[in-house]
Image (tube, rainbow, N blue to C red):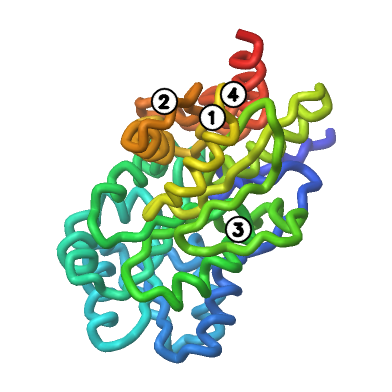
Amino acid sequence: MSVKKKLKTSAMIASIAAEGQPTTAAPFGHALVEAAQGNERIVGMTADLGKYTDLHVFAQQFPDRYYQMGMAEQLLMSAGAGMAREGFVPFVTTYSVFASRRAYDFICMAIAEERLNVKIVSALPGLTTGYGPSHQATEDIAIFRGMPNLTIIDPCDALDIEQATPAIADFDGPVYMRLLRGKVPRVLDRFDDYQFEIGKAKRLMSGGDALIIASGLMTMRAIEAADELAKQGVKVSVLHCPTIKPLDNATIIEEVRRHAGKPVFVAENHTVVGGLGEAVAGVLIREQVMANFHQIGLPDEFLDAGALPTLHDRYGISTREVVRKVEGVLAA
């Protein structure tokens, strides 16, 4: 009797890359090693999650500059603050849920209030794990957007991470960066002139029928959706906003005005409460810019556990669902 071999998958470290899509393994870990080779002040610190935040790559190269703090996220943030006070540039890694929920007050009082040069790099942002509410950081941006002095970065792909890592290392001040880890898709390579810059949004695609403003993995979805819609003759612009705070208000306003009367969508791997969508809406309201405004994001609820493709379809952040949302608005 033959025994069928079971295929094993992990909801914790599942890749968001589509089958056959180009990827890079551990882009953050390798980019941090490269940055640290030219800056001996960079140190790596984690709360028992070196392997799962790709910091193990740094640890292998610089074992004397790597600090394993155990399962103690509050201690991790306080120690990172102490390192920064001594002139180091600490990159502290954990999961987004633990940074935003468990260590919030320590980040606020020990790091942000003092404007200390700590880089908080956190894996499993939004809906990038199927392990359910205990590990799905669907509200981390909402939590951190209200914290003064904190820069918030939400990179799209491996290229974005490779460019953002040295940029935040050179930046003077506290940073929170959402991390896509493991085998990370490469989607921005097709845009030859793309260059990550803190505080800058970048137009990736131009079209006159609609505008999608996006960050993080939803920029990948927006690009894929624009490609699919183009096959139907629908031309969609895509504006990538890798910096959530400070937001590039001027570019956002310029792009919305350029699409006057056309649908404007904000797509984010985050709850529709308190994230990029509401940040963009606030800018438009304050500047009295009229827009046919729509949000694409996660619902204001605790999400289910399960396989990522199923969950992305269920909660409206798959490419198919983005296409469906744009088509529905254009047809209305």
Q: Which residue is mark 1?
A: 265
**Point 41% across, 74% down: residue:** 171
- Distance, label 4 to label 2, CA atoms, is 24 Å
Residue drawn where x is 38% and y is 55% of the image: 246
Nearer the observer: mark 1 or 2; the answer is: 1
Q: Which of the two residues, 200 or 251, is positioned nearer the viewer here?
A: 251
Discs 1/3, front: 1
Evaluate if marks 3 and 2 touch, with contact meaning CB atoms under 8 Å apart.
no
Where disc 1 sits, the SS reads: strand
How packed mark 4 is, by other alpha carbons closer than 10 Å (few <14, some 14-19, many 20 or more), is some
User: For the C terminus, which image quadrant?
Assistant: top right
Is disc 2 placed on a helix, strand or loop?
Answer: loop
Check disc 4 and give the amino acid type: Lys
**Can you give x and y, in whole percent of width and height, for residue 71 in the image?**
30, 63
Foreground disc of the pair 4, 3: 4
Percent coordinates x, y for residue 262 in the rendering = 59, 23
Q: Which mark is residue 262?
A: 4
Marks 1 and 4, how far apart in space? 10 Å
List the residue tagged with mark 3: 182
Report, in whole angstroms, how far the alpha carbon at label 4 lies from the one at label 3: 38 Å
Q: Amino acid at mark 1?
A: Phe
The crowd level at tag 2 (other Cα within 10 Å; few <14, some 14-19, many 20+) is some
Residue 323, quarter of the rendered image: top right
Local secondary structure at mark 4: loop
Counting from the top left corner in percent of width and height, residue 169 is at 45, 76
- The answer for how far apart the CA atoms under marks 1 and 2 are is 16 Å
Residue under numbered circle 2 = 299
Marks 4 and 3 close (CB-CB < 8 Å)? no
